[in-house]
Image (cartoon, rainbow, N blue to C red):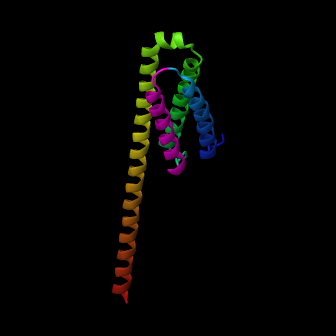
Amino acid sequence: MAEPSVEKFTTTFINVFKEIKVAVESIKVDERKCRILVNQCTVLIDALMYGSLDLQTRTGADFASKLEKCLTRLKDKTLAWSVLSPWKSFWRQNEICHGIEDFTQELHVMAMFYTNTRLEYGRQQQEYAGQQLEAIRQQHEVLQQQQ
């Protein structure tokens, strides 16, 4: 079975995001919340593109899979909301507003999780580098004592 690639997920995320953005622009309820939702999507996708998502780890692959499912659900909802007439949008505005808020919160939580995961990974890398330097220093001391 082929390993998932960052490029595949990034391309998928960007394509789905484009559909979401177009749909959100057509939603006739609370434009401010819609902009916040689009901004949250942008922040998360930027973090993934520039944060080098490691799909070789279980955490990275699980995260990418969950994000893909979330964005797909969001796309489906925003497409449905975007085709509502102004009258139907008015009658369903509470549902739409709550849905937008829920998705915005879900994406925010995912962005925070991803950021924390990247910070933890960076901390582990620094710790490992420190251990390597200490091992080299100890080897150097042993070699000096042998001379």
Q: In the picture provided, is 16 more to the left or to the right than 46?
A: right
Q: Residue furthest front?
A: 86
- Image quadrant in which the C terminus is located: bottom left
Can you give x and y, in whole percent of width and height, for residue 15 in the image?
63, 36
Would you say residue 126 sits in the magenta stretch?
Answer: no
Can you give x and y, in whole percent of width and height, for residue 105 in the image?
40, 30
* Residue 58 visible in the current orientation: no
Up/down of 86 relative to 103, above or below: above
Up/down of 29 relative to 68, above or below: above
Residue visible at 36% across and 86% down?
A: 144
Relative depth, front residue between 43 and 146: 43
Residue visible at 53% across and 38% down?
A: 64
Q: In the picture provided, is 91 more to the left or to the right than 130?
A: right
Q: In the picture provided, is 90 more to the left or to the right than 140?
A: right
Relative depth, front residue between 42 and 114: 42
* Residue 16 visible in the current orientation: yes
**Quadrant of the rendered structure where residue 115 is?**
top left
**Secondary structure that dominates the magenta span:** helix
- Image quadrant in which the N terminus is located: top right
Region in magenta: 29-52
Can you give x and y, in whole percent of width and height, for residue 3 in the image?
62, 43
